[in-house]
Amino acid sequence: MYLAAEKGDITTIIGGIAPNWGPFGSLGNEAKIMIEVVMAVAILLCLGIAIWGAAKQRIGATALRDTFSAEQGKGLIVAGLTGVFIIGSLGTLFTIVYGMAV
């Protein structure tokens, strides 16, 4: 009996789906960490915008009965979550574009 996971471990699976640094592979560890920190801060800001939009929508729709505030909250939710998606997929997009160029 042969098991599919016999030869590898979890790092094989994660390493297969995680993007590599592609064109930025020659950067030093400090530069990679700085890029990761900037991306993490940007994701947190986008999540904060989405949470602020959810609160604005909820307060505007129920307590104040302000439809403009509720619609503005919906826009903030969409903008925040779109930002999270775009920033989260930047590494994959750079790797794909760099791979296609090579």
Image (cartoon, rainbow, N blue to C red):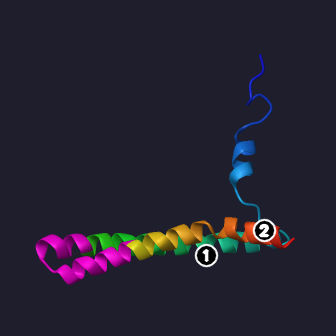
Say whether residue 63 is left or right of residue 18. Answer: left
- Answer whether residue 28 is visible to the viewer in this image: no
Residue 69 located within the stretch drawn in magenta: yes
| SS label for mark 1 | helix
Q: Which mark is residue 29?
A: 2
Residue 23 pos. (x, y %): 82, 72
Say whether residue 21 is left or right of residue 52. Answer: right
Q: Disc 2 marks which amino acid?
A: Asn
C-alpha span from label 1 to label 2: 14 Å
Residue numbers of the magenta segment: 57-77
Q: Is residue 39 above or below residue 17?
A: below
Q: Which residue is mark 1?
A: 38
What kind of secondary structure does the magenta stretch mostly adopt?
helix
Q: Quadrant of the N terminus?
A: top right
**Looking at the image, which residue is at 45% across and 69% down?**
81
Number of marks in the image?
2
Q: Is residue 66 above or below residue 39?
A: below
**Looking at the image, which residue is at 80% across and 31% down?**
7
Crowding at dot 2, Cα within 10 Å, few <14 / some 14-19 / many 20+, comes out as few
Residue 79 located within the stretch drawn in magenta: no
- Answer whether residue 6 is visible to the viewer in this image: yes
**Looking at the image, which residue is at 73% across and 31% down?**
5
